[in-house]
Image (spheres, helix red, strand yellow):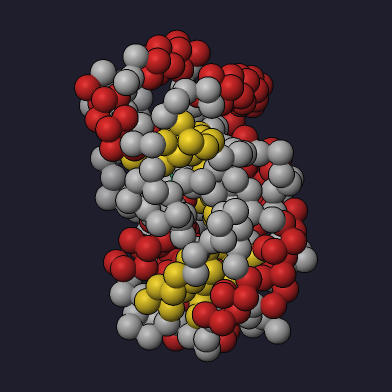
Amino acid sequence: MFDINNLLRDNIKRLVPYSSARDEFQGEASVFLDANENAFGSPLVQAFNRYPDPMQHQVKLRLSQIKGVPARNIFLGNGSDEAIDVLFRSFCNPGVDNVIIVPPTYGMYEVSANINDVAIKKVLLTDGYQLNLEGIAEAIDDNTKLIFICSPNNPTGNSINRDDIETLLANFHGIVVVDEAYINFSRQKTFIQELTEYANLVVLQTLSKAWGLAGLRVGMAFASEEIIEVMNKVKPPYNINEASQTLTLQALANVEQVNAWIKETLEQRDKLVLTLKDMTFVRDIYPSDANFILVKTTDAKGIYNYLVDNGIIVRNRNNVELCEGCLRITIGTPEENNKLIATLQQYQ
Ligand SMILES: *Cc1c(COP(=O)(O)O)cnc(C)c1O
């Protein structure tokens, strides 16, 4: 059975969170002399002299409507990278606990584990880039707190079989983190509707990819109320700044624009795949549920350098296990994709 008290670090169980000036007051007021702000304003057209809402109520309310998940089940981070770090700091005792990752996958899980001095157990994906459930079961021990699954997976682009993720959720007594950074591009169903089913589920999403807001640094975690409460206790009090909250609210009013871009990205992706697959140096293009494709080539390093010389940067994944010879290519605008194609057609 999942019991959050068996997972939490003792110092976090005991933690009394920072109480900000605005947390301690409720009701109406017009004079705020409680937070040592500059009451005159900001040397800008827009005023940023007041601290932002620590719990981001308005942004969460709007996200709640869009996602169909109650606001109390949403945590906002300074990018989903912050949510990853907060999970480590809440649940993993440095030098004692461990987490499982399933490479090839997103690099921040390992970096965040290293920063927090938390051991990593790696269980490689299968040749078809799916979970090795037996290997994961063998790797789990009494100190395994988190398992990170990225679906659609970065850098391979494919979705992880839903049944396999559910098997993990049903059998692992720690937390299964399902990173859905690319879910907007996928034909697969999100896991955010399963929060009531699985007490040990944390779903990560972000505004950095499909939503086009990477510069604002806003990421989301969806989980049970008890997990969200812990994450809110551990995060820095004002982790989403006022500019990000205001601009995010504006952007969230424009879902139609985002949906149109997603549609165009998928059309561009299909077109790029069709053109690339006939090029002599392309060995394989893996099925993608994301806004990028993983392309196996005869000479990743040579092609990468050739593209750099022509002002085009892709991601060289040649040195990543199970991705030998591979380049990860983000789908750009039609003009950018055409330039990529024209440049590659000149490659000998
Ligand atoms: C890009 C990416 C993120 C990072 O999201 P931020 O919200 O920008 O921090 C998280 N997970 C995966 C798999 C990504 O590819």
**Point 72% across, 70% down: residue:** 167
In which quadrant of the rendered view does residue 221 lie? bottom right
Q: Is residue 135 left or right of residue 344?
A: right
Q: Is residue 251 visible?
A: no
Q: Is residue 133 above or below residue 232?
A: below
Measuring from the top left, give residue 292's x and y in whole percent. 50, 34
Q: Is residue 152 above or below residue 255?
A: below
**Depth order, front residue of 270/20:** 270
Q: Quadrant of residue 181?
A: top right
Total number of numbered discs in the rendering: 0
Location of the C terminus by quadrant is top left
Residue 72, image x and y in percent? 64, 57
Q: Residue at x 40, y 57 (%)?
A: 321
Residue extending furthest toward the right: 197
In this view, the residue farthest toward the bottom is: 142
State the residue in front, 133 or 149.
Answer: 133
Residue shown at 32% from the left, 51% from the top:
319
Residue 67 appears at what percent x and percent y?
Answer: 69, 43
Query: Is residue 100 something one can see in this rendering?
Result: yes
Give whichever of 284, 203 is nearer the camera: 284
Which quarter of the figure is the N terminus placed in?
Answer: bottom right
Q: Position of residue 316 (x, y in %)?
A: 34, 40
**What residue sits 41% from the left and 36% below the top?**
297
